[in-house]
Image (spheres, grey):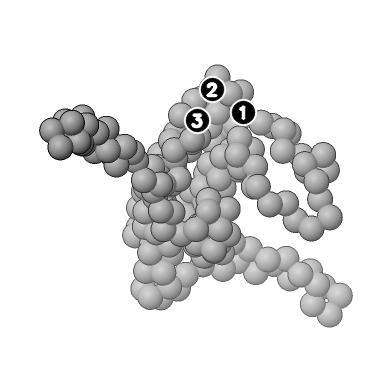
Amino acid sequence: MRRILSQTALMLPIIALAGCGEEPVEMPYGTAQQFMANEVQPTAEIYWGAVGAVSELVDGEAVFTEFEPETDEEWAKVSAAAVKLREFGEVLASPAYADGRGDDWLQFAQGLQDVATQAEEAALAKDPEAVFEVGGTVYAVCTACHQMYPPAELPEGETVDTVQTDANRPNTDETLEEYMEGSGE
């Protein structure tokens, strides 16, 4: 009996240590790919679609139409999209999405947070030119990240060989800030 007790006493720390292993962190929005497709992209499109211009042919004549939010409610929607993008950047920096990825992933996540803060400021100022300009920077941050971390699932009929994932790919030794400075943003 004494032998069983001493063996049990020796095994308890081992059992306790085995139970201390990290459990997998749950991804609250699904995989990174699902999160991008279902949350980040639609939210970014709300921001990008708020200000712009359309050129179309009407009865054989070119018609150029500019658009921007006109009501406080429309501006609030643009601002809310920017806030959500910043929050999504925080989620991307969380262990659920960042673990197993390079340090540059965290830089891109921080870049999204930083530019989303600028995007919110532009929307709160109800400045259509600033919203348009910052929208381009949001796009540049997203594109730079996608070049480093191409989507896992490609559109039907395309392969890694047919998608230009390396075109304008930032140098892996560059920080996000260095890449952004070099791209003219």
Which residue shows up at 65% across the image and 47% down it? 152
Q: Is residue 143 left or right of residue 16?
A: right
Secondary structure at numbered mark 3: loop
Residue type, mark 2 in image: Glu
Q: Is residue 74 visible?
A: yes
Q: Nearer the viewer, mark 2 or mark 3?
A: 3
Q: For the residues marked 3 and 1, what is the alpha-carbon distance in whole angstroms? A: 14 Å
Q: Looking at the picture, tell me which residue is in the foreground, 95 or 67.
A: 95
Q: Residue 162 at what x, y percent from top left?
A: 83, 43
Q: Which residue is mark 1?
A: 170
Which residue shows up at 62% across the image and 28% down it? 170
Residue type, mark 1 in image: Pro
Q: Which mark is residue 93?
A: none
Q: Which mark is residue 174?
A: 2
Q: Is residue 129 visible?
A: no
The reply to whether discs 3 and 1 touch (Cβ–Cβ < 8 Å) is no
Q: For the residues marked 1 and 2, what is the alpha-carbon distance in whole angstroms? A: 7 Å
Q: Quadrant of residue 20?
A: top left
Which residue shows up at 60% across the image and 39% down it? 149
Q: Is residue 146 left or right of residue 29?
A: right
Q: Which residue is mark 3?
A: 102
Look at the picture and state if 86 lies above or below 63.
above
Residue type, mark 3 in image: Gly
Secondary structure at numbered mark 1: loop
Given the current orientation, which residue lies at the most extreme left position?
2
Where is the C terminus found, in terms of image quarters? top right
Mark 3 vs 1, N-terminal side: 3
The reply to whether discs 1 and 2 touch (Cβ–Cβ < 8 Å) is yes
Q: Residue 111 at what x, y percent from top left?
A: 44, 39
Where is the N terminus found, in terms of image quarters? top left
